[in-house]
Image (tube, rainbow, N blue to C red):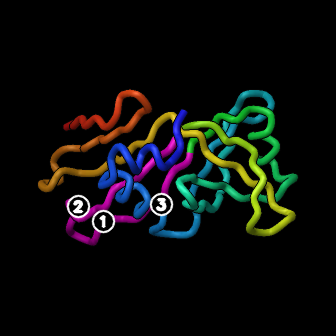
């Protein structure tokens, strides 16, 4: 598992695109696991602070309960459509997988639950300049940045 700063240090341009995609809109989509193992999708907000990615939520929310029980998560950036008539102008989407680790925070509301993400994977999916191929860039601890294309 890695911190956000590890991604920034290893692949700064990639990390900046990921951060930009996550900050395109306020609300992101968080996937957690319910007690029966089925998936739960929830809206959430994120913060990139001091080399970490933070999730803040109501302390007794179902997603907070999920993460306390089973820390595995997936986080999806906001969806932003391509400009009309310009599929190649689509900025793409970013995803982060890992584990939510409960942490004390010295800032922010006292009545919030805060989770730092230990990262196992970061992915950006976009289109090539001709909008003919899907481009999948992924970063993993120990493997670094890899790029694949799919037609």
Residue furthest to the left in view is 130
| Label 2–label 1 contact, CB within 8 A | yes
The label nearer to you, 2 versus 3, is: 3
Q: Of callouts 3 and 1, which one flags the residue occurring earlier in the amino acid sequence? A: 3
Label placed on residue 73? none
Q: Of callouts 2 and 1, which one flags the residue occurring earlier in the amino acid sequence? A: 1
Element assignment for label 1: loop
Label placed on residue 87? 2
Placement of the N terminus among the 4 image quadrants? top right
Residue at point 51% right, 50% down? Answer: 76
Out of 140 and 75, give the one closest to the viewer.
140
Q: Which residue is mark 1?
A: 82
Query: Vertically, is 37 above or below 42?
Result: above
Label 1: how many Cα within 10 Å (few below 14, some 14–19, many 20+) = few
Q: Which residue is mark 3?
A: 22
How far apart, in angstroms, are the residues tagged by discs 2 and 1?
A: 5 Å
């Amino acid at each position: 598992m890695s911190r956000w700063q590890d991604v920034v240090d290893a692949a700064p341009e990639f990390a900046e695109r990921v951060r930009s995609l996550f900050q395109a809109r306020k609300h992101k989509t968080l996937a957690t696991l319910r007690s029966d193992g089925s998936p739960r999708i929830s809206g959430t907000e994120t913060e990139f602070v001091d080399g970490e990615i933070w999730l803040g939520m109501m302390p007794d929310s179902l997603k907070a309960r999920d993460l306390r029980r089973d820390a595995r998560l997936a986080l999806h950036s906001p969806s932003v459509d391509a400009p009309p008539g310009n599929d190649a102008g689509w900025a793409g989407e970013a995803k982060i997988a890992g584990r939510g680790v409960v942490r004390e925070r010295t800032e922010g509301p006292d009545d919030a639950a805060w989770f730092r993400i230990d990262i196992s994977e970061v992915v950006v999916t976009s289109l090539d300049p001709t909008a003919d191929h899907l481009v999948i860039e992924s970063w993993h601890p120990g493997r670094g940045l890899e790029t694949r294309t799919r037609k």
